[in-house]
Image (cartoon, grey):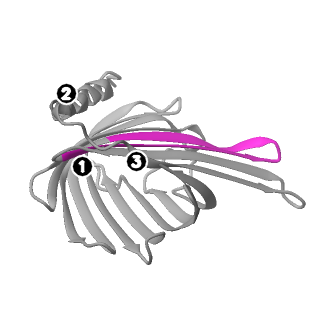
């Protein structure tokens, strides 16, 4: 594996964005998320989730990023430990169509992944874009570099990405979100990832919001000894900015 590949992608993103700074763009906007769950009695477990999203729109483009970290213990033993980060640049082609370049890095040793890099280039399109409903899809191709935990060998392969996202605003302060993502290995048909999240978000007061969500992460060909499916149900507080 060549660890400098993500750095190259990041530099390309910055190089593309830099010319847009001629006009002062709107400030960054996004949210910070925090969730903590503890159980006791017949079982004893603690789970902590911290995440953040941010984006900045320019005249005809957008730069966005997302990070998430999860740590869980059961009876004093680590049961979940993972993090991921994504950087994405969108360049408008028309009012509803855009090109994108993205880099994702993730680590989940308890699921057999020491580190994984996913680099993607593709197109996105808004099929519906109104004040209350947004439906968009993305399709891209790129390369995945994966370091499973020892003694498994590192590997790299061409990959693709299909993504769908839907948002419905019930009111100005309450909305529903649904996303689905499919990431196949183009060299091995049986090897693919699927990620899905359903979320309901409502404003509490000021910059504070409440989020309840359910996510499923599926790896059809995980490292030997690991399960295919992971799910996460959580309630969280959001601070928006």
| 83 over 229 or under it: above or below | above
Residue at 29 percent across and 55 percent down: it is 189
Q: CA distance from mark 2 to mark 1?
A: 29 Å
Helix, strand or loop under label 3: strand
Q: CA distance from mark 1 to mark 3?
A: 35 Å
> Where residue 30 appears, x then y in whole percent?
43, 49
Q: CA distance from mark 2 to mark 3?
A: 21 Å
> Where residue 112 appears, x then y in whole percent?
54, 40
The answer to if 221 sits in the magenta stretch is no
| 56 over 38 or under it: above or below | above
The answer to if 83 sits in the magenta stretch is yes
Helix, strand or loop under label 2: helix
Q: Mark 2, residues whose alpha carbon is within 10 Å: few (<14), some, or many (≥20)?
A: few
Label 2 with label 1: CB-CB less than 8 Å: no
State the residue in front, 100 or 237. Answer: 237
> Where residue 12 appears, x then y in whole percent?
21, 29
Side (left or right) of 33 relative to 126: right
The residue segment tinted magenta is: 61-87
The answer, for residue 211, to whether it is visible in the render is no
Residue pushed farthest right? Answer: 41
Give the quadrant of residue 3: top left
Q: Earlier in the sequence, mark 2 or mark 3?
A: 2
User: Can you identify the residue that label 2 sits on?
Assistant: 15
User: Can you identify the residue that label 1 sits on?
Assistant: 186
Side (left or right) of 49 relative to 95: right
User: Can you identify the residue that label 3 sits on?
Assistant: 29
Residue at 52 percent across and 29 percent down: it is 151
Residue at 26 percent across and 65 percent down: it is 136
> Where residue 38 appears, x then y in whole percent?
78, 54
Q: Earlier in the sequence, mark 1 or mark 3?
A: 3
Residue pushed farthest left? Answer: 94
């Amino acid at each position: 594996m060549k660890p400098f590949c993500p750095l190259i992608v990041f530099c390309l993103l910055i190089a593309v964005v830099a010319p847009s700074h001629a006009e002062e763009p709107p400030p960054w906007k996004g949210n910070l998320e925090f969730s903590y769950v503890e159980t006791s009695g017949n079982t004893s477990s603690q789970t902590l989730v911290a995440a953040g999203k941010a984006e900045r729109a320019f005249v005809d483009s957008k730069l966005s990023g997302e990070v998430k970290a999860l740590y869980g213990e059961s009876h004093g033993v680590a049961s979940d430990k993972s993090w991921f980060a994504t950087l994405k640049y969108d360049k408008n082609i028309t009012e509803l169509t855009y090109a994108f370049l993205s880099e994702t890095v993730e680590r989940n040793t308890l699921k057999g992944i020491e580190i994984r890099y996913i680099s993607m280039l593709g197109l996105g399109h808004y099929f519906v874009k109104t004040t209350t409903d947004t439906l968009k899809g993305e399709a891209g191709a790129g390369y995945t570099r994966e370091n499973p935990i020892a003694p498994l060998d590192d590997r790299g392969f061409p990959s693709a990405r299909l993504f769908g996202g839907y948002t419905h605003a019930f009111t100005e302060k309450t909305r529903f979100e649904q996303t689905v993502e499919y990431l196949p290995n183009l060299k091995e048909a049986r090897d693919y990832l699927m990620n899905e999240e359903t979320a309901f978000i409502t404003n509490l007061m000021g910059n504070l919001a409440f989020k309840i969500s359910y996510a499923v992460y599926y790896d059809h060909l995980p490292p030997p000894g690991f399960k295919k499916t992971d799910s996460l149900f959580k309630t969280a507080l959001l601070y928006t900015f």
